[in-house]
Image (spheres, rainbow, N blue to C red):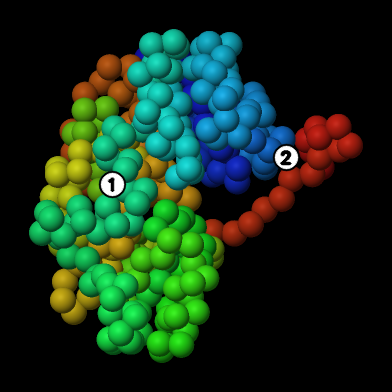
Amino acid sequence: MEDKNILILSAGRRVELIKCFKDAAKKLGITSKIVAADLMNNAPALYFADKKYQIPRIGTDNYIDSIIEICNEENIHLIVPTIDTELLILSQEKQKIEESTQAKVLVSDESVIKICRDKINTQRFFEENGFGVPVQIKEEDIKNENVEFPVFIKPLNGSSSINTFKVNNIDELKFFYNYVKEPIVQEFMEGEEYTVDCFLDFNSNIITIVPRKRIATRSGEIIKGKILKDQEIINDIRKVLEVLKPIGQITIQCMKTKEGIKYIEINPRFGGGAPMSIKAGANSCKNLYKLLNGEKLDFNEDYRENISFFRFDDAIMVDENMELIND
């Protein structure tokens, strides 16, 4: 198997993900350089990569050129985005990047990103294709105070559960409707919440679907979860993916309610909790190396179920020159 180098964008705190790529390369017996890039030179994950770069802010004039330059300098074969705000520009510039480098960009088509990044588009996608979603509360009903509480309010283009609130009465709703930028209001759902890690090849063929029951979260990211082979969720998610046709890693949030499965949002990237599914056996990092080397993969459920993960914080120490200190 040929060596393949990986570039992780917006590396931030994605230490687990970098370790997963390194572990996958080791298990496959290949040498893979993991390069990490971030806007900030003090992003923790940079210190766990083989090479680190500080790059311009997403969307600025030199952003795409800096990625191309890194790819050519480090012989990168795969670019892995990790945050929502970089997905649209990478999908729009995907052809330019791939034609200017040897790297593939792990991002879905622009049409898919536009469905996922805008909550109204996401809601419309699920509704038009017959999938369950929470009822959306119209602005007219809010003005007329014709709302059944509780409801849930969130930003149209939000992420990480920032400015998302359960609202219990009309006074609260009017306040948060003005407070949250470009808000969307939905019925408040009760049930068991799941994050589903999905992996598809570069032609949108489904390889793995892994439901994770959300036991506890912090700032929208799972910190305690349990892997379950819930066939009802797996079968329904398969239908979603067959219509949406994303590529690579994608995370779908849904809830099992008394009325059935209802979908909350789609994040077409590696979610923060993705290492849980990877360590359980649905190894997207290993699968990506195999795909880059021309292997064909088939759908499988070869991962462990009924195992739980409890994530925690850690820290690194650097000196006055921002060099890592190994205690």
For the question of whether residue 256 can be seen, the reply is no
Residue drawn 41% across and 89% down? 169
**Furthest residue to the left?**
130
For the question of whether residue 126 can be seen, the reply is yes
Residue drawn 33% across and 31% down? 287
Q: Where the N terminus falls, by quadrant? A: top left
* Residue 5 image position (x, y, % from top left): 49, 19
Of 13 and 147, the residue lying toward us? 147
| Label 1 sits on residue | 115
Residue 17 horizontal side relative to residue 56, left or right: left
Residue 122 horizontal side relative to residue 12, left or right: left
Q: Secondary structure at mark 2?
A: loop
Of 231 and 122, the residue lying toward us? 122
Query: CA–CA distance between discs 2 and 1?
Result: 33 Å
Q: Callout 2, which amino acid?
A: Asn
Q: Where the C terminus falls, by quadrant? A: top right
**Is label 2 in contact with label 1 (beta carbons under 8 Å)?**
no
Q: Callout 1, which amino acid?
A: Ile
**Furthest residue to the right?**
320
Q: Residues within 10 Å of mark 1 (few under 14, many from 20)?
A: many
Q: Nearer the viewer, mark 2 or mark 1?
A: 1
Quarter-wise, where is residue 128 in the image? bottom left
Vertical position of residue 158 compared to residue 61: above or below: below
Q: Residues within 10 Å of mark 2 (few under 14, many from 20)?
A: some
Q: Secondary structure at mark 1?
A: helix
Residue drawn 55% across and 35% down? 58
| Label 2 sits on residue | 42
* Residue 264 image position (x, y, % from top left): 31, 62
Quarter-wise, where is residue 291 in the image? top left
* Residue 120 image position (x, y, % from top left): 29, 57
Count of all numbered marks drawn on residues in the image:
2
